[in-house]
Image (cartoon, grey):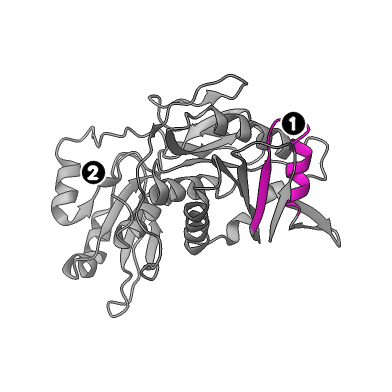
Amino acid sequence: METRTQVSHTPAPLLVIGLGGTISLALENGRACATDNLAQIVAQSGKATPQAQVDTISLRTKDSADLTVEDVIDAARLIQSKTAQYAGFVLTTGTDTLEEVTYGLHCLLGSSTRVIVTGAMRPPYMDDYDGIANLTDAFTACRAIDAHAGGVFAVIGHQLFCAAHVFKHDPARIDGFVSTCPNHPALSVAPGMSVAASAKIAPARLDPLKDVPKVDMVSVSLGSRWPHDPKRLPDGLVLSCPGAHSLPKALLVDLKPMFDAKRPVVLASRCVSFSTTPQSFYPGYAAFLEDQGLDISNYAGLPPQKARLKLIFRLMGLAA
């Protein structure tokens, strides 16, 4: 459903796309539920940004945990279809999967247009609701990107994050997001800010697309194994490992059918501050694992959830 919120007339409006999440919650029969109140939220934020015309489209009304890869692809496809009409895009979603949605859009859209993803840590029925402030900051950050540049960023808690490095480290705090890379720290959002972005490039076509491949994720922990049916192998596998590329030897045996079938197996560290350069305190171990068939270097610096998205899109021919 498309709604136009007329804050004032400008030749190049912004489009807000809603996927649901905490920012749009309402109490229904005593239970918090995502609702279609995007236009109302945008109208409230317009009081702080009266110079802007903002249009809204509620693409999904979902809890963030219910979002799918297909939802992210549909959002990217919608943005692609509207780039000639809008100066930039703001996408609202739930914070539990905000980092995945942001990175997924980055994989699909690259620097083709200006996109800011935001949400809320508090629902609208609480006194400390932060959705309006985050949406207002998202408008500020979107306009701070040069008109000839593009990129996908996250804005929350008055901070702006690069798509590859935004990470939710605390589920309760308003400022519960951090950057996982010291070379790309979060920026404070403020009027007059400048956001470094890349020159616009044409993104890959998103229609028609192959079916989304099945990529499983396994958490590696004490004594963990990978139970599987050799006749029903996934298209790809991501191992969420502890530390700097640590993997039980027994698990390597379980992975042999994937290696024999030439299906990708990615090793990604759960340590979110892990270096973007695949280094190890144990010389040769990462190289040994890659010799066995594991892919480490192409996903270095990405936590497992983002590594899984990148693998999915690579299998679809959509990500480098």
The residue positioned 68% from the left and 39% from the top of the image is 53
Report the side of 44 relative to 179 (left or right). Answer: right
Report the side of 89 relative to 27 (left or right). Answer: left
Dot 1 crowding, Cα within 10 Å, few <14, some 14–19, many 20+: few
Amino acid type, residue under disc 2 in the picture? Ser
Q: In which quadrant will I find the N terminus?
A: bottom right
Q: Is residue 50 magenta?
A: yes
Q: Residue 133 is drawn in which quadrant?
A: top right
Q: Is residue 319 magenta?
A: no
- Percent of width and height locating residue 254: 26, 66
Q: Label 1, secondary structure: give it.
A: loop
Q: Which residue is mark 2?
A: 297
Amino acid type, residue under disc 1 in the picture? Pro
The residue positioned 23% from the left and 51% from the top of the image is 295
Dot 2 crowding, Cα within 10 Å, few <14, some 14–19, many 20+: some
Residue at the farthest right position? 29
Q: Are marks 1 and 2 in contact (CB under 8 Å)?
A: no
